[in-house]
Amino acid sequence: MQHLEHPLDVNKILRKKKSIKKYLLLQDDLIEKNIAILGGSTTSELKNILEIFLLKNGIKPKFYESEYNKYYEDALFGSDELDKFNPDIIYIHTTNQNIIKYPESKDTSEDVAMLLSNEMQRYKSIWNSLSKFDCAIIQNNFDYAKDRSLGSLDCYDIHGKTYFINKLNDEFSLNARKIKNLYINDINYLSSYIGLRYWFDPSLWYQAKYAISMESIPELAFNIGKIISSIFGKSKKCLVLDLDNTCWGGVIGDDGLDRIHIGTETAISESYTAFQKYVKELKNRGVTLAVCSKNDFENAKEGFSHPESILKFDDFTSFKANWNPKNHNILDIAKSINIGVDSLVFIDDNPVERDIVLSQVPSVSVPDVGSDVVEFIAHIDRNGYFEPISIADDDINRSQYYEDNKKRAKKQATFKSYDEFLVSLDMTAEIKSFSSVYLDRITQLTNKTNQFNLTTKRYTTGEIDTITLSDEYIKVYGKLTDKYGSNGLIAVSIGRIENRACHIDLWLMSCRVLKRDMEFAMLDELVSKCKDQDVSEIIGYYYKSSKNSMVSDLYEKFGFNLLERNDEDSVWKLDITNYEIKNKFIGVKND
Amino acid sequence: MTRKELFDGVQDIFRDIFDEDDMVIEDKTSSDDIEDWDSLNHINLVSAIEKEFEIRFALGELMALKDVGAMIDLMIEKLK
């Protein structure tokens, strides 16, 4: 599906969309999501193409599409159909065509301020009214009008359209920073990336009321797809880099430290330096870095000691420089930082190495970057692999977790027993009932945790909110801290109470904290809450998926008895009257 | 380019847009004959044709197109 990655094959996507869709529907493990599109112009083709990009990212959308240009009415006055649809995402596709009134030349600055305020008021009431769905709202900002009768003056005279649009966009940004769940789809950037003269097609506007040109639709859908994937926690986590002719020009083993190209001396050196700067920027906002290179380890390491090198050896959480096949090293990297291979992006200038990794480990993202470093940044940037929806502390700290993990692993080697190691970690956990501050994180975990997940049930923010407020559920989250730092919120369990029995609808944990006995601490807390509510037994379910075999025997380990087995699914029961506390290593703070 | 070559190219576009590999069109084929050929798919067809043959239809010309034959004739005019 290379044509769905940068650079997009726009014509192929538009022509072959139906067969592409059929092909993508064959994938396993698609998660279903309801996407409402409220359009200020025709959205039919946008919906079709967006479907393709979502499918490619593992999301199977069901769509609600407002009647033509009824975005405002649908948002403000509601519709039964939309209410019933219960969207996970609402996308508001408005453009400069939806601006009701631009300033006129006779207007005073007060008049212009009033026009701005009127325009903003409409959007504020839309966002406010839609907040009842408690779902993510993706809102276009504004593209520039193609015509600007004031020429360049248009951008700074208060009567200019460009000026007016800039003001509106500033206001949109301001609101998006304040309003939870409001995300901006930056079509102002996208239209300039594509070029305004290609972005808008007046003929198509008059004929069919498409506010953007046909050829821009795939780029727009691509952009929305990236935001939605990010909302559902599908962004990548780790950038894996080759070294020779990727991080620097030349071959360190042959040329030596003095002769590799990095720095500002030559055009070639500068191009590698620019790439390193971009990578460093990613690292600084939470992306984990790794090296996967066919090289002698000492030589490879030496490359980063070059005085002009922006990246340093310590920037990499995993560093595989040896002569093993790269597909093996890639798997080792994922294992050593404890993330799924589908969270990796691999950049290598050598097409043969890219092929080996892509064919042997297809879930790794391997963009076809070519061999010219000048193109590398665009492949990482345009594909939006690491696109965040916000710069959360969790993301910035994520690299830190993994680095802490390395320290933990080193420590582990020096202890006589694993128990002794666990004791040394000084672990404390906060295990409490859901509270509203964690809604987003909990929802995100339910949507992206695949391995340590007994039922793989996915929840929307709205559902988690309902469960939080309901007495019929026992719902606990767990945060784990150890002497190296906090691991954040990493475990979630939801049990439904029915006739003195607690049915475990969801039991998941992030693999970040595997083998730390956190699951036992969670079980202890769940049992204790069950007893408080006069529940006498717990029923656990294991539903086999393609990724969760690691927990097929979890309930057995917990001491549950097998009730029934259907194929690879199983149901388990635990009588809790004589339950004994299982966690020995973690100090727990509870409600 | 002969009329036949043009016609075959247009037929390929129809096959892609409607995702029917064995679709056969004729000069007199019109939107009445193909269920999915609504106004929105009409736009998709026209855009694909414009791209493929590097031509551009003017606004008024499109409204008047009654069937495939008329479309091909107009394309021949444009490609002259």
Image: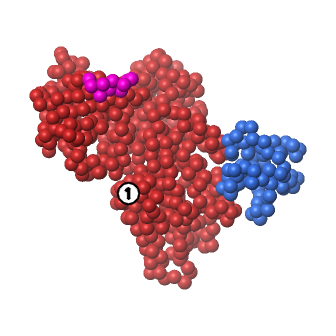
Splitting the image into 4 quarters, where does residue A176 fall?
Answer: bottom left
Residue at 63% in and 63% down: A209
Residue lying farthest front?
A499
Quarter in which the N terminus of chain A is drawn: top right
Nearest the eye: A106 or A8:
A8
Nearest the eye: A459 or A99:
A459
Residue type at mark 1 is Phe
Nearest the eye: A274 or A32:
A32
Helix, strand or loop at label 1? It is helix
Locate residue A192 relative to residue A89 in the image: left or right: right
In this rendering, is residue A107 above or below A456? below
Residue at 52% in and 29% down: A348
Residue A423 visible somewhere in the drawing? yes
Colour chain A is painted in: red
* Residue A395: image location, x then y, percent: 34, 42
In this rendering, is residue A223 above or below A377? below
Magenta region = A562-571
Nearest the eye: A468 or A513:
A468
Colour basis = by chain
Locate residue A350 relative to residue A35 in the image: left or right: right
In this rendering, is residue A540 above or below A325? below
Residue at 74% in and 54% down: B31
Quarter in which the C terminus of chain A is drawn: top left
Q: Is residue A563 magenta?
A: yes
Q: Is residue B38 magenta?
A: no
Label 1 Cα crowd, 10 Å radius (few <14 / some 14-19 / many 20+): some
Colour chain B is painted in: blue
Residue at 39% in and 64% down: A129
Q: Which residue is mark 1?
A: A133
Q: Main secondary structure of the magenta part?
A: strand
* Residue A333: image location, x then y, percent: 40, 25
Locate residue B73 relative to residue A168 in the image: left or right: right
